[in-house]
Image: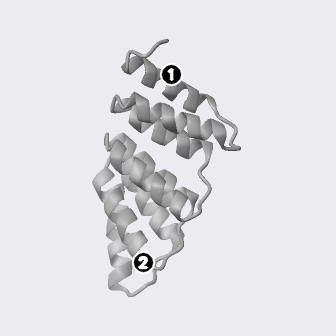
Amino acid sequence: EWENASHIFSVMAQSKVEYNTVNFNAVISACDTGGEWEQAWNFFSLMLRSEVQRDVFTFNAAVSACKRGGEWEKALQIFSVMLQNNIQATAITFSTVISAHEKACEWEKALRLFSFMLQSELECGTAAFSAAISACEKGDEWE
């Protein structure tokens, strides 16, 4: 239903209703769920240009959409913006970015992110470990 969410979002603009974090997060998440990474990227970019406060949910939804679309470079770019905005990445954020790199066979970058995650104070979940292991497999780096 990303089309409906996108339509409602555009009606808000026409009605001169101010956007907020929840509105942006909902439309980005709807685009992610609908497999529309480009639309999610467009809404995320619009949000960055606006005065609207971003939160961890904003970044997680945008990263997830890019991962689904095979856009590991955009996922990493979003992750970088997240850190620049001093928003604390979660285990979900790391796992999603690592998985995006794993799916693109970027095993070295995936392992660097995994190492960065291990150095943080986050509790690593099984998803991050699985993505890192899978990245090694795809890179034929089993040792």
**Local crowd at mark 1 within 10 Å, few (<14), some, or many (≥20)?**
some
Task: Evaluate whether residue 136 shows in this view.
Answer: yes
Residue 63 placement (x, y as % from top left): 44, 49
What's the residue at 36%, 66% (across, down)? Answer: 45
What's the residue at 49%, 28% (across, down)? Answer: 131
The earlier-in-sequence mark between 1 and 2 is: 2
Task: Evaluate whether residue 58 shows in this view.
Answer: no
What's the residue at 32%, 74% (across, down)? Answer: 10
What's the residue at 59%, 60% (across, down)? Answer: 87
* Location of residue 39 (image quadrant): bottom left
Q: In this view, does 110 lie to the left or right of 2?
A: right
Residue receiving disc 2: 50
Residue receiving disc 1: 133
SS at mark 2 in the image: loop
Q: Is residue 101 above or below residue 41?
A: above
Residue 116 placement (x, y as % from top left): 57, 40
SS at mark 1 in the image: helix
Q: In this view, does 98 lie above or below 14?
A: above
Asked if labels 2 and 1 touch by Cβ distance under 8 angstroms, the answer is no
- In this view, the residue in front, 104 or 142, is 142
The amino acid at mark 1 is Ile
Q: Is residue 34 left or right of residue 56?
A: left
* Location of residue 57 (image quadrant): bottom right
- In this view, the residue in front, 3 or 63, is 63
